[in-house]
Amino acid sequence: MTEILLLLAGLLGGAVNSLAGGGSFIVFPALLFAGVPPVLANASNTYAALPGYVSGAAGYWKSVAPYKDRLVVYGLIAAVFGYIGAELLLVVSDEQFSEVVPWLMAFAVLSFIFGNRINATLRARGGGRSGMKLLGTVLILSLLAAVSVYGGFFNAGLGILLLAFLAMAGMSDMHAMNGLKLFISSTIALVAVVRFIFNGSIDWYHGSIALVGVTTGGYVAARLARYIPTQWIRVGVIVYGIAMTLYFFWTAYGAQG
């Protein structure tokens, strides 16, 4: 029964990632419900998401090509600070992480809800490369470093934060932004997964079931995307994300009372 739950959660999470983003809101709680300890569940969720990031980034290559001069800098920052985020995850206990999870989930859900509005505002004010000059290269790259630490520590909501970063960096082409988002996500997830492997922090059995589901769901949803209203998916993800956030707050704090 647990295996079926994880496979279904992976299928749904992969589909949601392809259509609207936010699949980790589904896969991460499913790993917890399957009995995987919180830190291992988080690491296994990153492992399950990695193939989807890589294949998605490859699919957007033509859109990313005009911005290939950014790949080395973005990739290096994502790798270094994503690794730092993974290290931070490994020094907290399951109990400590369980207390942090509700706040991370709440932050990720709010970013998902208001991400499009924030991105639109930032693009309107940024106006291409002038936006990057206005904010300053150091500030922009510092923001990427902070987001990369977050992504190495906790995968949910990473895509929304990266889109906000790219908007602040002066980008407005959503196809290119999605491609760079997936490239950076792939880099963060790859270094994090390598670190988790050396620490023995991945539940290979449950994580691999979720991985098969996520990869399959993402592929199928990409083929059917034109027939599914994205707004319906977004609403479903938001409702589910809020419900899971409230549940995690209750288990971390309310159940102790």
Image: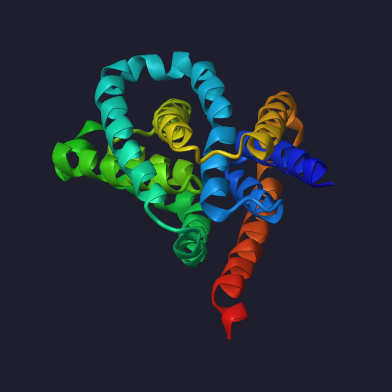
* Residue positioned 68% across, 39% down in the render: 206
Q: How is this picture coloured?
A: rainbow
Quarter containing the C terminus: bottom right
Q: Where does the image place residue 97, in percent across and percent down from the top left?
A: 47, 60
Q: Is residue 154 above or below residue 110?
A: above
Question: In the visual, does 224 lie left or right of 245?
Answer: right
* Residue positioned 29% across, 40% down in the render: 144
Q: Where does the image place residue 186, in percent across and percent down from the top left?
A: 45, 28
Q: Is residue 5 above or below residue 71?
A: below
Q: Where does the image place residue 92, in percent across and percent down from the top left?
A: 40, 56
Residue 15 sits in quarter: top right
Residue 203 in sight: yes
Q: Is residue 90 above or below residue 127?
A: below
* Residue positioned 73% across, 44% down in the render: 9
Q: Nearer the viewer, residue 44 or 214?
A: 44
Q: Nearer the viewer, residue 129 or 37?
A: 37
Q: Where does the image place residue 114, in percent across and percent down from the top left?
A: 48, 56
